[in-house]
Amino acid sequence: MAIGTALGILALAGAALAVTIYTISAIASSGTQSTIITGTLVASWGQGAELQRGRYVYSFFQAANANNQTMTARGITQSGTTLTNSASSTIIFNGTADFDPYSRGQAASIVRLNDTQVAMMAPIVGTGNEFKICTYNGGTNNITIDFSVNDGDTNNYIDRGPKFSVINKPSANVYTIAGVGVTKPNAYPYVRVWDLDTDAETITSRGILYPMGTSGTGNGFSQLVNLGVVGGKHCFAIFYAKGVTATGPLYYAVYEYNSSTNTLVEVVGDTLYRSGSAYITADIPWEIDNGRGVLMYSDWVNYDVEITTCIWDGTTFTVGTPSSFGNATKRGFHMTIRKYYDGQGDSKTQYIMVTGFFNSGVNTADVIVFPIFYDFDTNTWDVSKFDTADSEIVIEDPGTPSNNGRALKPYIGLADKDNGAVISIIFRGDGTFRGVIQNNFTTTNT
C-alpha cells in the first residue's frame, strides 16, 4: 500500500472517531407551563425521577387524615420542546399510606430502577414500609403498578422526606437501595440498605443504623450523599439537621456497604458540620464520581442556598467550601441539580440547577433554572449565573403569589443537549391551589 493511501485511511479513521462535546452557557427560553395534577387543599409533597433522557415520572403525595393518605403519579415524555403526559394520573397509594407516622410528615419518596421502572415507597402503619414497583412506557401510556412488597418493619417507618439511591445492582433483577430519613417516635436519623428483587418480588433488609443513636428528639430533614464505590465498598453519607423543627445545625456520618457480606458499617460517626440553622431537602441519588458527592441546603439565617462537594477516600471525609446564591428577596427553598448532557454523556463538570422560591415577594413560588459548573481541581462550584440573563424563570405561581406560598420539590430532566423539563409542586399560600405544574426549557450551548 502506498504511504499516501495509508495516511489517508488513518485520517479518515481519526475523523470517524472525533466526538463533539458541548458546553452549556445559558438557559435560553421556556415554554408554556401547564398543570398535570391538581390536588386538594391539604398538606402536599412530591418527588420526581428520570427513567431515561426525555422520560420522567412525578409523584404527588396528599396528606388528609392519618393512615388515610394518597399518592398519585403521572408520566411525562419529552421530545424537543413538546411534553406529552400519560393519559391520566395513576393512584399509587389509594388512601392506604401514612405520610407522618411519627408526626414529622413527608414520609414517602420514589427512586429510579431502570429505563422503565421506579419504586415508590410509603409506610403502612401496622404493616411496614411498602414498596410499589411501577412501570411507565412513555407517551400517553399510564403508569402501572407491577407489584407491591412490604419490608414488615413496624419499628422503623420511613419519615421526614426520606431519600433513596440505588447504590448497587448485584444481578439483573436485584437492586441494592440505600435510604436515609428519620424514624421511631422521637424521630432519629437513620441509614439503611435493602435488596429489592423484582423477579422474586421480595425486599430484604441488609441493615439499619442510627448515626446519633436513639436518644434526643425532634430532628429535621436529611440528605443522602452518594459517594460511589471506594475501596470496593459502596459508600454514602447522611447529612441531617438536629432541631425541634425541620431545621437546625447540620451533622453528618459516613457509611460503607460491603455487597459481598451484606454488611453496613459506620466509618465516620455523628459529626457537626455547621452550626446555625439549615434546611436540607435536596434529593440527588447519584455521585459526581467515585468518592465525590453533592451536598446542598438552604441557610435559614442568611436566606441563601449553599452547594458543596463531599470527598471520601476510604480514610478521610472532606467537605469543600460551599458556594452560595440567593437572598431574602430570592430565597431558595427546595432545589436539585442534574448533570448536563453534553452530547456524548452526562458531564461531571457541567450541571443545571433548579430552585423553587419561598417568602420572596413577587418571586414567591417561582422556579428558576440556571447552569452551574464544578471544578475538580479546586473542589468548588461556580453558581454565578443565578438570577442573570443566563437563567430563566421556568414555572410561576399561576395565581397571585402570597408570602407563604412556595415551590416544593422541583425536579429537572433532560431530553437532549438542547431541551429539558421542570416539574414542581406549587403550594399557593392563600390556599387556593396546590398541584403539580410542568414546563419545558431550552439551553444555549456551543
Image (tube, grey):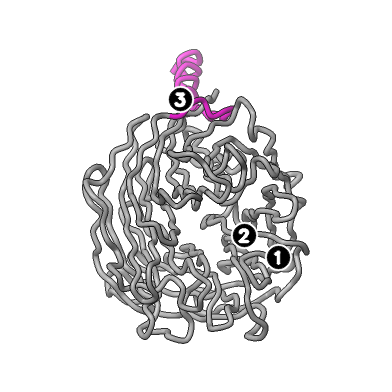
- What amino acid is at disc 2? Ile
Label 1 with label 2: CB-CB less than 8 Å:
yes
Q: In this view, does 423 lie above or below 157?
A: above
Look at mark 1 in the image and give the residue it sits on: 250
Look at mark 2 in the image and give the residue it sits on: 280
The image shows residue 386 at horizontal and vertical percentages of: 64, 35
Residue occupying image coordinates x 41% and y 74%: 195
Q: Closer to the N terminus: mark 1 or mark 2?
A: 1
Residue nearest the viewer, comparing 302 with 255: 302
Residue occupying image coordinates x 53% and y 25%: 445
Can you tell which quarter of the image residue 139 is in? top left
Find the magenta span and give its range.
1-30
Q: In this view, does 347 lie above or below 69?
A: above
Please tell me how crowded label 1 is: few (under 14), some (14-19), or many (20+) other residues with Cα within 10 Å. Answer: many
- What amino acid is at disc 3? Ala
Nearest-to-viewer mark from 1 and 3: 1
The circle on residue 188 is none
Q: Closer to the N terminus: mark 3 or mark 2?
A: 3
- What amino acid is at disc 1? Leu
The secondary element bearing badge 2 is classed as loop
Residue 30 seen from this side: yes
